[in-house]
Image (cartoon, helix red, strand yellow):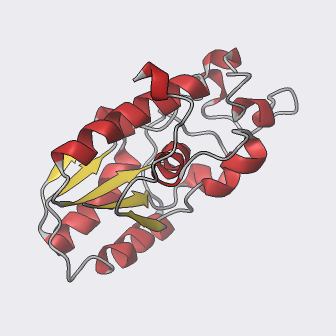
């Protein structure tokens, strides 16, 4: 099994540090160029599938990769970015505690944000499924910064403390690629819930 995880290219919201979440923002010109350059990293590969978030910025990135690899694209709703609720479309505010938003134990729910424990559960259940389904194959996941955090934790183990300080540094940059070949066998917080 080889799983390549790609974050979508840059959008105007990325440039302006505005919360995107489920808001369907397209790539900007830089993002399109990033996606085209990232696609070239896969030009000598023949992946079996590209699974992509239903949001436009991820689909546009996946289409660039598909064009180079001639690999079919499948929309995967569980790869959608974390919902940021009422924070979407707005820049950070002093009264929005971003540190708490990434604190697994506190499980922040204000502003109708998707709780981080539900995010991890959603992503872990998806990964449990695809690591069985594609265990002999090569798959590309095109997704978002928020989703890259639980993916990294799933494959390489969760940090001792799941908080802003530890999770933020796991986030993929625009069009960054990470490769995973097997899961580190280590009990995680969601093990009993799956």
Residue at position x 32%, y 38% from top? Answer: 128
Q: Position of residue 167 (x, y in %)?
A: 67, 47
Of 118 and 63, the residue lying toward us: 118
The quadrant holding residue 136 is bottom left
| Residue 47 visible somewhere in the drawing | yes
Q: Is residue 12 above or below residue 82?
A: below
Q: Does residue 185 appear to the left or right of 105 in the view shown?
A: left
Of 155 and 184, the residue lying toward us: 184
Residue at position x 47%, y 29% from top? Answer: 191
Q: Position of residue 127 (x, y in %)?
A: 34, 41
Q: Is residue 56 above or below residue 5?
A: above
Tell me the quarter of the image containing the N terminus: bottom left
Q: Position of residue 21 (x, y in %)?
A: 53, 36
Residue at position x 35%, y 46% from top? Answer: 56
Tell me the quarter of the image containing the C terminus: top left
Q: Residue furthest bottom?
A: 44
Number of numbered discs present? 0
Of 185 and 178, the residue lying toward us: 185
Residue at position x 17%, y 72% from top? Answer: 69
| Residue 54 visible somewhere in the drawing | no
The quadrant holding residue 84 is top right
Q: Position of residue 16 (x, y in %)?
A: 68, 52
Q: Does residue 72 appear to the left or right of 119 in the view shown?
A: left
Q: Does residue 42 appear to the left or right of 162 in the view shown?
A: left
Q: Is residue 57 above or below residue 48?
A: above
Q: Is residue 137 above or below residue 108?
A: below
Q: Does residue 96 appear to the left or right of 149 in the view shown?
A: right
């Amino acid at each position: 099994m080889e799983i390549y995880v790609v974050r979508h290219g840059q959008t105007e919201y990325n440039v302006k540090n505005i919360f995107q979440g489920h808001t369907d923002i397209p790539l900007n010109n830089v993002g399109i160029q990033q996606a085209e350059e990232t696609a070239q990293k896969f030009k000598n590969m023949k992946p079996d599938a590209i699974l992509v978030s239903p949001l436009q910025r991820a689909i546009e990135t996946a289409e660039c990769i598909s064009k180079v690899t001639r690999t079919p694209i499948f929309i995967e709703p569980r790869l959608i970015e974390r919902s940021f609720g009422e924070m979407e479309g707005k820049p950070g505010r002093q009264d929005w505690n971003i540190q708490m938003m990434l604190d697994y134990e506190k499980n922040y729910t204000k502003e109708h944000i998707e709780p981080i424990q539900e995010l991890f559960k959603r992503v872990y259940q998806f990964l449990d499924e695809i690591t069985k389904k594609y265990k002999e194959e090569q798959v590309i996941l095109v997704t978002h910064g928020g989703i890259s955090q639980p993916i990294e934790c799933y494959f390489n183990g969760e940090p001792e403390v799941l908080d802003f300080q530890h999770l933020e540094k796991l986030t993929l940059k625009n069009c960054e690629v990470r490769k995973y070949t097997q899961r580190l066998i280590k009990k995680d917080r969601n093990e009993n819930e799956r």
